[in-house]
Amino acid sequence: MSEPTLPRIDRRAAMKWMLAAAGTAWLSVHGQGAGPASSALGTTRSTTGGYGLDPNLVKSYHPGDFWPLTFTAEQRRLAAALCDVVIPADEFSPSASAVGAHDFIDEWISAPYLAHGADRKLVLEGFSWIEAQADKSFGKRFADLGDAPRRQICDEICFLPNATPAFAEPARFFARWRDLVSGGFYTTPEGMKDIGYRGNQASGTFEGPPPEVLRKVGLA
Amino acid sequence: MPIITADQAKDSYDVVVVGSGAGGGQAAYTFAMEGAKVVMLESGRNYDPREETPMFQTNFDAPLRGAATPDKPLGFYDATVGGGWSVPGEPYSNASTNPKEQFTWWRARMLGGRTNHWSRVALRNGPYDFKPYSRDGLGRDWPVSYEEIAPYYDKVEMLIGVYGTNEGMENTPNSSPGVLLPPPKPRVGELLIQKGGATLGVPVVPVRRAVLSRALDYRTIPAKLHPGNPAAQRVLAESMQARAACFWATDCGRGCSIRANYQSTTVQLPPALATGNLDVITGAMGYQVTLGVNGKADGVAYIDKATGQTRRIRARVVVLAASSCETVRILLNSKSAAFPDGIGNGNGLVGQNIMDTVGASLQAQIPRLEGLPAHNEDGAGGAHMYSPWWLYRDQLAGKLGFARGYHIEISTGRRMPDLGTNAGLEGLTGGSYGAAYKQDARRYYGSFVSLSGRGEMIPNRNCFCELDPNLKDRWGIPVLRFHWKFSDHELRQSEHMHQTFARIFEAMGGKAVGRVGRDGYEGIRPGGNVKHEVGGTIMGSDPATSVTNRWGQLWDVKNLFVADGGPFCSNADKNPTLTILALSWRTSDYALGEMKRGNI
């Protein structure tokens, strides 16, 4: 009977994985190309500080649960104001800041994963530009401005293809900011209801599209 | 779920199964139901879908609103535990640094493996798919025919539950009467794609997915699957009764706590464990098949991850179902005087003929889907409709420039909002923000559809894996090094997918979002990225040109079997899971017969 070949492993390596098994943060080992060149992934694993490969999926989480947040009180005030420029309250739903979109964005730009570092830079530099504009044009903090001056600043940067070269970088910030605010808002219960998501309900049957939907698209 | 530790394992078993996914789950089920004493080694942790599945959690409950991260590359709620494109301490390598020649390897480290998160798209290979070489002179034929596998497809579909229809289409086989569950009604976007496709001759029919659109008939199915075995029938009937029908909510990629879709942890392992014939050791990474003095396999060596110790388990029969490439790795690491290059590798074919699925997707915005009355489109937690390959004749006549087909998977609808739902709308809105943006978001929500091609890749000499001469995992075990290069068949097929999708979108009155690929590389996903990697231990009728025989049995070692995707001789466009299940059941039946006959 042949004995299994024992894998060769030195003492230092043994210590290393025992620490890992014990839950201590450690440097992960990768082969070359251990992630796809393209695809939704687009980032490489950070060595520490994320939620790991086996988080509890049935718990509810909040910004700050896994990694420290970034915004100062003044930045958070600006973030809330800028959230509400993108998504103000209307007759159907509250504003983005009223449902915590700015806290989600703080969580997002503070995340330890590589791709989030780029958003962190973009957002914080965008904040500086916005405050500088508010100061230059109105001598105030952006959050202290009324709706019209806020829009006056944002109109210049709300659509990248129309932005003049001097406004291209802040326009890139605003495009990303709008997506983050939108994501932060439309994933809340209020946002999902507003947009018309009616799923996530247990049901005995699935009826398919109602007749008025089929009529509207010309299938009935 | 009752799980044992390495210390609690018995001295020896009839069968050791390495891996607990589709192949391993089915093998353990078949052996245990027929009375064999089985031990299963799973390298990941125990996982109980009944307790751990996020059934109604929304992205609001998740960190980063559920977005994909390197820790959870398919999103926070994807069922995968302990894995992804990279697993800490368990590296692999690519031989080339050329970005077009990369292989990406998805692994799960959990009981049930990838069956916990898969799409549940359960398609049969057709008659052509088992004899591709005979049809067009490329690749290789299987040593088995569709007719030989068809009874196992019926059995598997009855066991796991598959919804769909019999359309009688070319190379898209019907199931036997009464086997399939009724398909769910199409969503409005799926109906529009069907209508648009029809103008181009692209058929759109109900897809087949392993989801219980109604409860399984526990009164009649067990006797069909286990004739003459009342104990197995009783155990299976109880397990089937415990599986609820789909309640039309929750994406299947999260897994299913009510056991309404197929994952080995809800379908095969509960009844197999209920027989009392199955022990499962989790955190047990098999790395080598051990040999007895008679030249037969006598068990498996594994790392007990909890202690880091090397252990071994003895058994009369060894079944490898670790996933195609991990099985290759185990065989290549099973070196001895008798097998200096690894068991089964005397002809150098272990690790050769690795195939993935050709994947390319395109999204479009469809004006007719704008501003629809709000309604619930969750449905069966995945697609209801798809397009089977439709150009067999043109292709055989050489009109397409690539030799094998693809099917189209469809994604539409008013899905649970995530961070991408209203992202990047500027092209439609001209950069609106404020009250106008809220109106735009309401208007465009649900108006996007996505088509994904899933195509057959032909095996080629440039796609294989071997042991990396230097790199080892954290336990010192040599790891795999991949070589990868698509041929023109795959690249032209990917290009055809994009062009076809763009035409379907136009026929629907919509427009592709993003660039329509004119070069196959623009659309095609990297090797392994569709996670359908098969081959590496291909079956055949000649020991000189294959690793296993028609039963998945190693030519060189009669009591050693492969029951994952490794023995696949081709990788039809049909997603491999259903065929892995059918082959594993058949392999296990054969091994049971050989055990009874005293041959192994």
Image (cartoon, coloured by chain):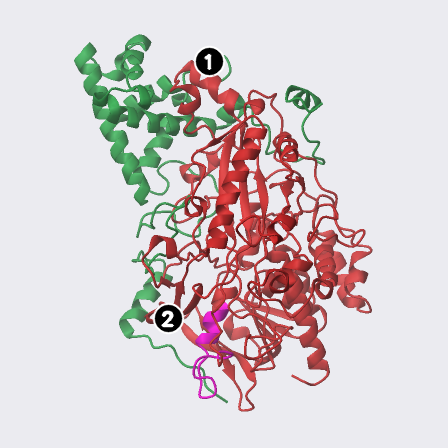
Chain colours: A green, B red
Label 1: how many Cα within 10 Å (few below 14, some 14–19, many 20+) = few
Tell me residue A182's x, y (percent).
42, 26
Q: Considering depth in this image, is B358 or B383 the residue closer to the camera?
A: B358
Please say whether residue B283 is visible from this viewpoint: no
Check the picture and name the quadrant holding the C terminus of chain B.
bottom right
What residue is rendered at 69% in x and 51% in y? B172
The stretch of residues the image draws in magenta is: B327-345
Tell me residue B83's x, y (percent).
44, 56
Q: Which mark is residue A142?
A: none
Which amino acid type corresponds to the residue marked 1 in the rendered image?
Answer: Asp
What residue is rendered at 51% in x and 74% in y? B7
B165 vs A71: above or below: below
Q: Considering depth in this image, is B158 or B125 the residue closer to the camera?
A: B125
Tell me residue B415's x, y (percent).
55, 33
Circle 2 SS class: loop
Tell me residue A14's x, y (percent).
32, 70
Please tell me whether residue B334 belongs to the stretch shown in magenta.
yes
What residue is rendered at 22% in x and 22% in y? A165
Please tell me whether residue B212 belongs to the stretch shown in magenta.
no
Q: Which mark is residue A90?
A: 1
User: Looking at the rendering, which quadrant does residue B308 occupy?
Assistant: bottom left
Circle 1 SS class: loop
As drawn, is A212 to the left or to the right of A127? right
Write down the residue under mark 2: B475
CA separation, marks 1 and 2? Answer: 59 Å
